[in-house]
Structure formats: C-alpha cells, structure tokens
Amino acid sequence: MRKISLLLALSLLFLSGCSGEHVPTIEDYSWIMTSVQSMDADGQVIAFGERGSSTLASAKQVDLTCEAENGNLTLTNHTNDKTYGGTYKLTQKDPQSSIYEVVVDGKEGMAVVAMTTYHDGSQDPTFIINLGDYTINLVAE
C-alpha cells in the first residue's frame, strides 16, 4: 500500500508542472498507452507503446488504447485482441488535475488526468492509472 501511495504522489508531483488553463477529464480524449510499470520490477517499464520506451530487455511493445464514457472504461490491447472493462468515478478535481477511483477487470485503483508540460513548453493531456502492482501511463491520441 505504501508503494501505491508513493507512486500516486510521485505521479501527481510529476504532473504539478501543469497549466491550469484547461483541466482535462477522462472523457475528453481517446488514450494510448506509453508504458506499463511493474512494482514487482521496482517500477521498471515492462511494456511500452509506440510513443514509449524501456531499458528492460524483457519489456514488450504493446498497442493498448483506452476509451472512457459515462462511467465505463474500455481498455483494448490491439496486440493480442483482448478487451478489459472497467468503471471510473470522479473523486476530486482541482485547477491542475482530475482524480478518479477506477476498477479495471475487477482490480481497484486510482487514476489521475492532467496536462503535462514539457521543458520546451509543449503540453500533452496525460492519464495515469495505478492498479496496485501496475501503473499504466497513457497520453491523448
């Protein structure tokens, strides 16, 4: 539980450099995965998307997308044609982020959506789902 809290806090800290102009919500975008991190592998990236990377030799490239509508999540792994269902509920919104309780394929977790600002000033909507043993990082498609 401590690792989950630490990871979510770090994720929120990472996103704190965000602009308050528009706080994205989970429904605003179609999402594509950049990486999946495993707590069993000390937070290393075990899977990565087209826009992600990993230094772990055993990491696999995966094409995963996520859609959210009316409290329902659909994660589709196009690599193996599997679909995972879930739900989400907004629990907190502030000028930088929207925080959700999520359940994906029976696993409960937390998620955050915010604008990530990069060193060059560009921004991307970012969606991070923490499901205990795994953290899924996604960006707007």
Image (tube, grey):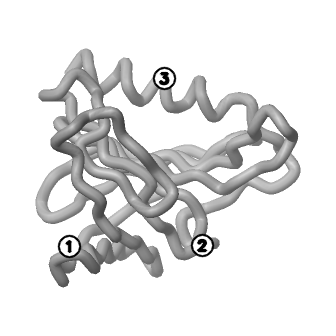
Give amino acid for label 2: Tyr
Q: Residues within 10 Å of mark 3 (few under 14, many from 20)?
A: few
Estimate the spatial distance between the alpha carbons at disc 3 and disc 2, rounded to whole Å. 23 Å
Cα distance between the residues tagged 1 and 2: 18 Å
Q: Nearer the viewer, residue 67 or 71?
A: 67
Q: Nearer the viewer, residue 115 or 139?
A: 139
The residue that appears at 85% across and 38% down in the rendered structure is 120
The answer to which quarter of the image holds residue 141 is: bottom right
Residue occupied by mark 1? 84
Q: Disc number at residue 135?
A: none
Q: Earlier in the sequence, mark 3 or mark 2?
A: 3
Name which residue lies at 35% across and 52% down. Answer: 48
Q: Which residue is mark 3?
A: 10
Left or right of residue 74, residue 15 in this image: right
Q: Is residue 113 left or right of residue 56?
A: right
Position of residue 129 in the picture relative to residue 92 (left or right): left
Which percent across, then down, holds residue 100? 44, 51
Measure the alpha-carbon separation of dots 1 and 3.
26 Å
Percent x, y of residue 57: 21, 38
* Marked residue nearer the N-terminal end (1 or 3): 3
Q: Which residue is mark 2?
A: 29
Q: For the residue carrying disc 2, how many other residues have a C-alpha within 10 Å: few (<14), some (14-19), or many (20+)?
A: some
Label 1 residue SS: strand
- Secondary structure category for the residue under label 2: loop
Specify the amino acid type for callout 1. Tyr
Q: Nearer the viewer, residue 76 or 68?
A: 76
Q: Nearer the viewer, residue 47 or 96?
A: 47
Q: Amino acid at mark 3?
A: Leu
Identify the residue at the far front of this view: 57
- The mark that comes first in sequence, 1 or 2, is 2
Q: Position of residue 67 (x, y in %)?
A: 44, 76
